[in-house]
Amino acid sequence: MRIPVLVEHYSAYTPPGYVRDTVRKLVEGLPEQCIAGLRCVVLTNAAALPKGSAGKVRKRRLRRRHCLGFYHPAGRDGGAWIEIVVDNAIAGWRVPAMLMRVPIVRETVLAETLFHELGHHLDMIAGAAAPSGEQAAEDWRRRLFGMYLRKRYWYLRPLVQLAKIYAHRRR
């Protein structure tokens, strides 16, 4: 399986030590057809982004430095690529440092942004059940995260089923 290259480009920022390995694990945990045509994943921080806006969201300008990630479609120079703004992606969750030591927690935090941006890629190459744009990317994000959890944490499935039964009986 050919996985996309992982590139780090930070400006005056040192990411937590788990970021690179966690993103690699997330990408490797997906089916090959989901990452086909993806050249690289760039990990960066808000200070390294150029100034300006990233477009309009709900009739207001969205500053690039407030975004969690970007999808860059394939151009003349090669395949598509994804840019994750690590400091923004992590800060949006407000998870205590102690909890970030748990693999499934940090995978969930980074998968939120990575799989959303990958959803834009899949929308471009395969389409989506939802209308195009943010809604399609969110639909793909949910599907990709489900695939990832079923493959990586298959052994938790019986526990989740028991928790659902228990929660249903308490109602």
Image: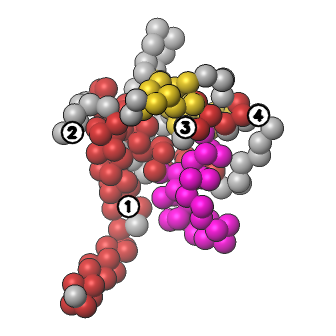
Badge nearest the viewer, 4 or 1:
4
Q: On the image, numbered disc 1 is attached to which residue?
A: 149
Q: Residue 95 in magenta? A: yes
Decide: few, some or many residues near mark 1? Use Cα within 10 Å; few <14, some 14-19, many ≥20. Answer: some
The image shows residue 95, relative to residue 135, as above or below, that is below
Q: On the image, numbered disc 3 is attached to which residue?
A: 67
Q: Is residue 14 visible?
A: yes
Badge nearest the viewer, 2 or 3:
3
How many marks are shown on the rendered structure? 4
Q: Which disc number belongs to residue 11?
A: 4
Badge nearest the viewer, 3 or 1:
3
The image shows residue 152, relative to residue 54, as above or below, that is below
Badge nearest the viewer, 1 or 2:
2
Q: Is residue 34 visible?
A: no
Q: Residue 152 in magenta? A: no
The secondary structure type at the circle numbered 3 is loop
Q: Amino acid at mark 1?
A: Leu
Q: On the image, numbered disc 2 is attached to which residue?
A: 130
The region drawn magenta spans 84-111
Q: Amino acid at mark 4?
A: Ser
Position of 31 with respect to 131 (left or right) is right
Q: Amino acid at mark 3?
A: Cys
Could you tell me how far apart the alpha carbons at marks 4 and 1 are, in whole angstroms? 32 Å
